[in-house]
Amino acid sequence: MYGKFIEEYLFSRENISMIVLILDIRHNPTENDKMMYEYIKNTNKPYLIIANKADKIAVTKVESELIKIREVLNLSDKEILIPFSAERKIYTENVWNKLEVLD
């Protein structure tokens, strides 16, 4: 039900300049995350993927969790995946830099 609505929205809205997919870095992407990623990718609109809650894992594990997400979603090296923490405001500059570049 929601899938049809989301797909229609993403494909029919001309004023969408960028799409941001927010995932939880602590967990592998769910089937819904995978489906949303496919919708987003197929729109041919600029997008980036943010792995939120990076403050909830050890700094030394952030990169390995990003690699897992890349593998599960089968992301290319060109697709942007950035860690982020809304709560502790870490990695925020990286996200803003990418948003400015894609804008």
Image (spheres, helix red, strand yellow):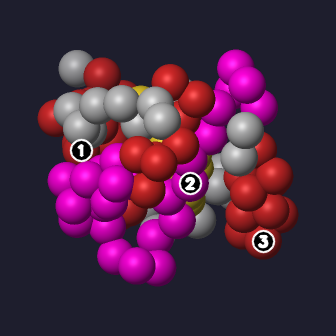
Q: Are marks 1 and 3 in contact (CB under 8 Å)?
A: no
Whether 103 is drawn above or below 77: the answer is above
Left or right for 80, reference 42: right
> Mark 2 packing: few (<14 Cα in 10 Å), some, or many (20+)?
many
> Height in image: 71 above or below 30?
below
Residue 71 left/right relative to 43:
left
Among numbered discs 2 and 3, the one appearing first in the sequence: 2
Q: Which residues are magenta?
A: 64-89
Q: Are marks 2 and 1 in contact (CB under 8 Å)?
A: no
Amino acid type, callout 1: Lys
Query: Which x, y percent locates residue 26?
Result: 36, 30
Residue visible at 70% across and 20% down in the picture: 87
Q: Nearer the viewer, mark 2 or mark 3?
A: 2
| Residue where numbered disc 2 is placed | 82
Residue flagged by tag 3: what amino acid is it? Val
Helix, strand or loop status at disc 1: helix
In the shown orientation, is residue 23 left or right of residue 76? right
For mark 2, give the secondary structure: strand
Q: Position of residue 79 (x, y in %)?
A: 46, 70
Residue drawn 38% across and 61% down? 41
Gap between marks 2 and 3, in whole Å?
14 Å
* Mark drawn on residue 34: 1
Q: Residue at x 71, y 46 (%)?
A: 91
- Vertical relation: 101 (above or below) 28: below
Indicate which disc, 2 or 1, sits on the residue closer to the N terminus.
1
Q: Secondary structure at mark 3?
A: helix
The quadrant of the picture occupied by the C terminus is bottom right
Give amino acid for label 2.
Answer: Ile
In this orientation, does residue 4 appear? no
| Residue 2 in view here | yes
Q: Nearer the viewer, mark 2 or mark 1?
A: 2
Label at residue 101: 3
